[in-house]
C-alpha cells in the first residue's frame, strides 16, 4: 500500500505524490535526473565541434542531427494533440532559450567573456528553485529555500569561475563595456526557468521536446546564414563529425529526459538537482579537454552539494 493505492503485479511503478492535481512519478524524476548527466558532456563536445566548424555552424549542425535523432527515436505526438497555448508559449520559450545562449556565446569577444556569459546562464537552477517554491502555495516557501539557493549559487560561481581563473573585477568591466551577451544569457536563463516551471501545466501531459528541437535547428541555421561565416575553409577533421553526433545525443537526449521529468516527475527535486549541471559540466570538460581542476572548483562543488542538501531537507519537511 502506498498513498492509499494498492499495487499489483504488472501495475505501473509506485508514485511519489501529487503536483498540480497530477500524480508525481519517481521513475519520471529519475529519468529527468539522467538529463543532468547527459548535459555534463555537452559543453566540452560543443567546444570541440566549434573549433572545427565555428560557433554558429557547429551549433546548427548539432541541433540538426539532434532533431533528426529525436524524430526517429522519439517521434512527437500528432500536432493536433498539443494544446495551442503550450505549443505557442512553450515553443517560443524553448527556441528563444537555445538561440539566446548560442548568440550570447557567439557575441562574447574573448574566451574569458565566454566563461562569464556561461556563469550568467547558470543562474537558471536558482531561478527554477525560487519559482518552484513560489508556485508551491506553501507558506514562506521562498524564504525557506533562499539560504540553500544562495549557498549553491555561490558554489556554482566558485566552481566554474574559479577553475577558469576568472577575474571578477575584469568581468564587471566587460559587462559595462558590452552588456548585450550578458543580457541575452540572463534572458535565456529566465526563459528556460519559466519553460521548466510553468509550461508543464499547459501541456496536458504531451511533451513537445521532439517538436521544438527542429525549430531550434531552423533558428540556428538562420543565425548562421545572417552571420555570413559560411563553411570553414579548412576541411573539418573526421573526429569533429563524431563529436557532432556525441553533442547531438547529449543535448537531444538530455532534453528528452528533462521534458519527461518536468511533465511527470517532481519539479522541486529536479530543480534542486539541477545545481549539479554546471559543476558536472566543468568536471567533464576538464577530463575531455585535458584540463586540471583547481582548488576553487572543489570548494565550489562542496558548496553546491551543501546548498542542494539544505534545499532537499526543506522540501522533505513539507
Image: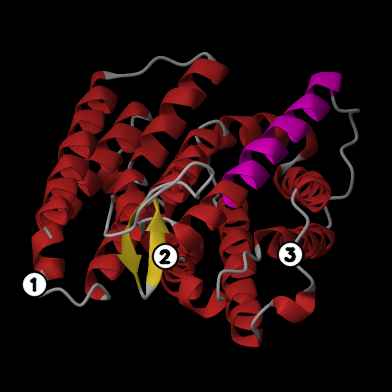
Q: Of discs 1 and 2, which sits in the foreground? A: 1
> Could you say which disc has been placed on residue 140 in the image?
1
In the image, is 215 to the left or to the right of 272? right
Instruction: State the separation of the CA atoms marked 1 and 2.
Output: 20 Å
Q: For residue 241: magenta?
A: yes
Q: Residue at x 72, y 33 (%)?
A: 49
Q: 31 and 133: which one is in front?
A: 31
Instruction: State the separation of the CA atoms marked 1 and 3.
Output: 37 Å
Q: Secondary structure at mark 2?
A: helix
Q: Residue at x 28, y 42 (%)?
A: 157
Q: 114 and 147: which one is in front?
A: 147
Q: Dot 3, crowdedness within 10 Å: few (<14), some or many (≥20)?
A: many
Q: Secondary structure at mark 1?
A: loop
Judging by the rendered image, the residue that carries numbered circle 3 is 211
Judging by the rendered image, the residue that carries numbered circle 2 is 193
Instruction: State the separation of the CA atoms marked 3 and 2.
Output: 19 Å
Segment tinted magenta in the rendering? 237-255
Q: Earlier in the sequence, mark 1 or mark 3?
A: 1
Residue 164 pos. (x, y %): 38, 30
Q: Earlier in the sequence, mark 3 or mark 2?
A: 2
Residue 77 pos. (x, y %): 75, 66
Amino acid at each position: 500500500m502506498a498513498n492509499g493505492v494498492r499495487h499489483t503485479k504488472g501495475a505501473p511503478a509506485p508514485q511519489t505524490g501529487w503536483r498540480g492535481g497530477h500524480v508525481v512519478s519517481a521513475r519520471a524524476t529519475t529519468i529527468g535526473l539522467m538529463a543532468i548527466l547527459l548535459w555534463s558532456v555537452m559543453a566540452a563536445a560543443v567546444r570541440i565541434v566549434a573549433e572545427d566548424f565555428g560557433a554558429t555552424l557547429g551549433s546548427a549542425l548539432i541541433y540538426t542531427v539532434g532533431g533528426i535523432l529525436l524524430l526517429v527515436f522519439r517521434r512527437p505526438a500528432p500536432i493536433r494533440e498539443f494544446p495551442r497555448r503550450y505549443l505557442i508559449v512553450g515553443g517560443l520559450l524553448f527556441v528563444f532559450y537555445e538561440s539566446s545562449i548560442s548568440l550570447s556565446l557567439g557575441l562574447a569577444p574573448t574566451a574569458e567573456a565566454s566563461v562569464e556569459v556561461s556563469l550568467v546562464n547558470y543562474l537558471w537552477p536558482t531561478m527554477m528553485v525560487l519559482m518552484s517554491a513560489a508556485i508551491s502555495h506553501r507558506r514562506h516557501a521562498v524564504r525557506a529555500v533562499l539560504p540553500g539557493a544562495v549557498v549553491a549559487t555561490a558554489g556554482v560561481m566558485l566552481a566554474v569561475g574559479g577553475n577558469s581563473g576568472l577575474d571578477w573585477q575584469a568581468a564587471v568591466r566587460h559587462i559595462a563595456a558590452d552588456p548585450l551577451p550578458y543580457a541575452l544569457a540572463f534572458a535565456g536563463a529566465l526563459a528556460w526557468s519559466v519553460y521548466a516551471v510553468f509550461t508543464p501545466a499547459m501541456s496536458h501531459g504531451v511533451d513537445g521536446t521532439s517538436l521544438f528541437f527542429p525549430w531550434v535547428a531552423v533558428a540556428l541555421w538562420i543565425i548562421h546564414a545572417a552571420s555570413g561565416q559560411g563553411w570553414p575553409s579548412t576541411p573539418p577533421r573526421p573526429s569533429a563529425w563524431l563529436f557532432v553526433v556525441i553533442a547531438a545525443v547529449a543535448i537531444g537526449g538530455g532534453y528528452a529526459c528533462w521534458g519527461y521529468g518536468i511533465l511527470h516527475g517532481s519539479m522541486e527535486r529536479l530543480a534542486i538537482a539541477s545545481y549539479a549541471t554546471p559543476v558536472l559540466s566543468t568536471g567533464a570538460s576538464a577530463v575531455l579537454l585535458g584540463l586540471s581542476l583547481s582548488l576553487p572548483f572543489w570548494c565550489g562543488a562542496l558548496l553546491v552539494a551543501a546548498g542542494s542538501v539544505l534545499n532537499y531537507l526543506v522540501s522533505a519537511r513539507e
